[in-house]
Image (cartoon, rainbow, N blue to C red):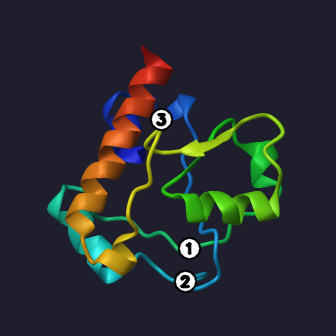
Amino acid sequence: MKKMVHERGLDDEFEVDSAATSLEAIGEDVYHKARIELIKNGINGFSHISRRYRKDDYNHFDRIYVMDSNNMNNILRITEDRDGKIQKLLKNRDIADPWYTDDFDKAFSEIKKGCRDILDELVD
């Protein structure tokens, strides 16, 4: 999403962040297989240390997107969605977690589609 926002010249209008909903990889850099997929798709030269979603993230961000129902349930255990901010990246379905499927290409493609659709909706 950050790359798409940047390519449209909208850096000053969006704050894009990423947070985990579980504790497994907190404090870790991007998983090596995910980094390979990102580089393959022209996204490189960055670092991202994983952090856990916090209750105050709900008040800070206007919208919160999750990949799947598991992430949705984890976030809803941390905070209630009183303003309807939390939704799936792909409106009506989950994106399979590549950590388990090992299909980083498919996950990247679906995430890219979801991000593109959201950005188109927000700026058009």
Precedes in sequence: disc 2 or disc 1: 2
Q: CA distance from mark 1 to mark 3?
A: 22 Å
Q: CA distance from mark 2 to mark 1?
A: 7 Å
The quarter holding residue 75 reads bottom right
Where is residue 61 shown, x and y percent of the image? 70, 42
When the figure is inspected, residue 16 is found, relative to residue 24, above or below; the finding is: above
**CB within 8 Å, label 2 to label 1:** yes
- Left or right of residue 105: residue 84: right
Where is residue 117 shown, x and y percent of the image? 38, 31
Amino acid at dot 1: Ser
Report the residue marked by disc 3: 11
Q: Residue at x 77, y 48 (%)?
A: 58
- Quarter of the picture holding the N terminus: top left
When the figure is inspected, residue 69 is found, relative to residue 84, above or below; the finding is: below
Amino acid at dot 3: Asp
Report the residue marked by disc 1: 50
Q: Residue furthest top?
A: 124
Q: Residue at x 26, y 68 (%)?
A: 104
